[in-house]
Image: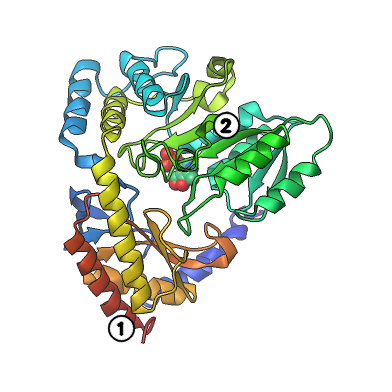
Amino acid sequence: MSDLFSKFDALIEQRETLLSTGMTDPFNLVMERVESPTVAICNGQRTILLGTYNYMGMTFDRDVIAAGKQALDDYGAGTTGSRVLNGTYAGHKACEEALKDFYAMDHAMVFSTGYQANLGIISTIAGKDDYIVLDIDSHASIYDGCALGNANIVTFRHNDVEALEKRLKRIPEGAKTLVVLEGVYSMLGDIAPLKEMVAVAKAAGAMVLVDEAHSMGFIGENGRGVAEAQGVIDDVDFIIGTFSKSVGTVGGFCVSNHPKFEILRLVCRPYVFTASLPPSVVATAATSITKLKQGADKRAHLWANSQKLHAGLKALGFTLGTETPQSAIIAVIMPDLETGAAMWEALLHEGLYVNLARPPATPANMTLLRCSLCAEHTSEQVDQILDMFEAAGRATGCIG
Ligand SMILES: Cc1ncc(COP(=O)(O)O)c(C=O)c1O
């Protein structure tokens, strides 16, 4: 009998070798209790969280929690249906209104996850004879959206404006083209040169979609993302986002000013053929999005913390993903998976959780310790984090 699992053998062996050393499985950690956006109990130990996407710390916001509880009481635990049948409640509409208001855009469509938003929008608007030009380091949900729609896919070198321009010039005359970009690339925490890229895409007559998953709430004067910060948000045709990061719950969305946007509700399969979000989730999301509009102080504090952590890690001798801090993600580059895993475990013993990222999720086969800050981290916590990195770095030989 053929073994359909044989393709996983190399991965199984690599994992078994790593775990046979007695180390804690970095991909199976349990948060036994979560006390706040920045502290949890893991393996019975109080642990500072530096690997969540809770950038604005909204998970424990009192108003957000109250809205969720109220919606549970008023509407029950779930909708048990698709948005196009019985699954659109007042709360889903209110959530879309909150998004339209937040982005100052005409249309908003809420999906059950950000993954599904990319899957749905990209596959529905770019089909068999169309072209998608995308950054090679794009998120898996973008690649999966391209594959589902069966469009012709053309990748270009990460963040390289000239490479994008060259690829666009080679698209056959008359073909319809979508350029897909991200505001912040989540592995290294670097931002895209959207100003130049959007100009190049528009000059070629392409439509532009920007995934602002890691910038919403934090980057840009109103927290609308990198496109806002670089002054090109009005030239972007579709913004994709998620509720699982700054918004602090789960869900995804697309906002747009395209006049025909609403038709997508009838033709987008990952929107139609799945149950809608529970009423409690859309209530928490709507409340959080509305509060994020007033987040200027939190944004300033998060920038200050990002700068402090970046400078501190650099001074300790770690190699970082970016020369200067560009977002709330600071990636520490490890020489190999074994050292990365040892460092990850040493940090956990110190009482710090970071994300261990490894290929194929990472660019150029890198192993990364990805630190993502939260607006609720205090400056003292950042000092503690740096002490922990120093101790773990010395214990594992990562720094001298
Ligand atoms: C750039 C990007 N887009 C989309 C997603 C998917 O978001 P969600 O967690 O809501 O599915 C992620 C999540 O990691 C992401 O990093």
Quadrant where the C terminus is found in the figure: bottom left
Is disc 2's CB within 8 Å of ligand 1? Answer: no
Q: Residue at x 57, y 43 (%)?
A: 195
Q: Residue at x 30, y 46 (%)?
A: 299
Q: Estimate the x, y position of residue 238 in percent, counting from the top left.
A: 54, 30
The answer to which quarter of the image holds residue 219 is top left
Is residue 86 positioned above or below 173 on the image?
above
| Any part of residue 87 in sight | yes
Figure quadrant, ligand 1: top left
**Please, what is the three-letter code of the amino acid marked with disc 2?**
Asp
| Any part of residue 151 in sight | no
**Residue 235: which disc?**
2
Position of 116 with respect to 177 (left or right) is left
Q: Residue at x 62, y 59 (%)?
A: 7
The answer to which quarter of the image holds residue 346 is bottom left
Q: Estimate the x, y position of residue 328 in percent, counting from the top left.
A: 36, 54
Is residue 105 positioned above or below 308 on the image?
above
Q: CA distance from mark 1 to mark 2?
A: 50 Å
Which residue in the structure is indicated by mark 1? 395
Taking depth in this image into account, of 192 and 348 the one nearest to the observer is 192
Secondary element at tag 1: helix
Q: Estimate the x, y position of residue 222 in percent, counting from the top left.
A: 36, 35
